[in-house]
Image (cartoon, rainbow, N blue to C red):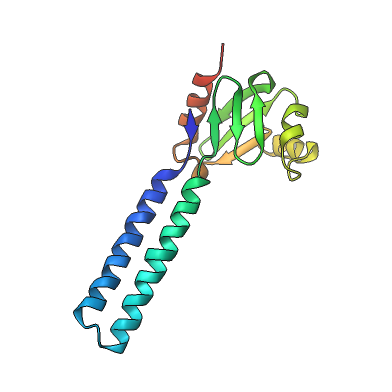
Amino acid sequence: MIVTPRGKLVGLAVVCAVFTAMGAIVLAVHPTATLNLIVGVGAMAFFGIGGGASIVSQWRRSTVLVADDDGIRVRGAGTIAWADVDRIGSNASLLGIRLRGTAGFLAGAPKEHTAESLRATRTATGWDLTWPAALLGRPPREAATALQGRRPR
């Protein structure tokens, strides 16, 4: 089970393609006009090259969570073993994971995750780790159900 917001990137790719095509059309209509040359080349460079590079970069980093037999791999923070997962839940705007113990997660997590930050998040939300709906690519309830479905019994 993979949680990723790639649908939005597909929409962004379509928008970039349309503006790149419009730049090419502006350039093809009257290639000798200075304004058409500036606008056409600028649109093709910005949306075609810049947009394309940005989309490829974001696509590669768009996987937020991957659940498998070992646990839940969190992008940039390591793996949470299923034995360390107490609860997986959601509300209208967040997916949350509550941990039984934080030592296993913190051992592989970057320095931004500390025992204090996990306690503060638990106090504020009821979960140790949270992800807003905008990062999930699906409603938090669906993501929580999918993660629970992948959890070994």
Q: Which residue is drawn at 52% across and 44% down?
A: 135
Q: Position of residue 132 (x, y in %)?
A: 55, 42
**50 left or right of 118 in image:** left
- Residue found at the far top of this picture: 153
**108 left or right of 9 in image:** right
**133 left or right of 7 in image:** right
Q: Where is residue 102 in the image (x, y as percent from the top left)?
A: 75, 29
**50 left or right of 34 in image:** right
Q: Residue at x 49, y 25 (%)?
A: 145
- Residue found at the far left of this picture: 29
The residue nearer to you, when weighing 125 against 4, is: 4
Q: Residue at x 25, y 76 (%)?
A: 26
Q: Position of residue 90 (x, y in %)?
A: 55, 31
Q: In this view, does 119 lie above or below 20?
A: above
The residue nearer to you, when weighing 85 against 87, is: 85
Q: Is residue 37 above or below residue 59?
A: below
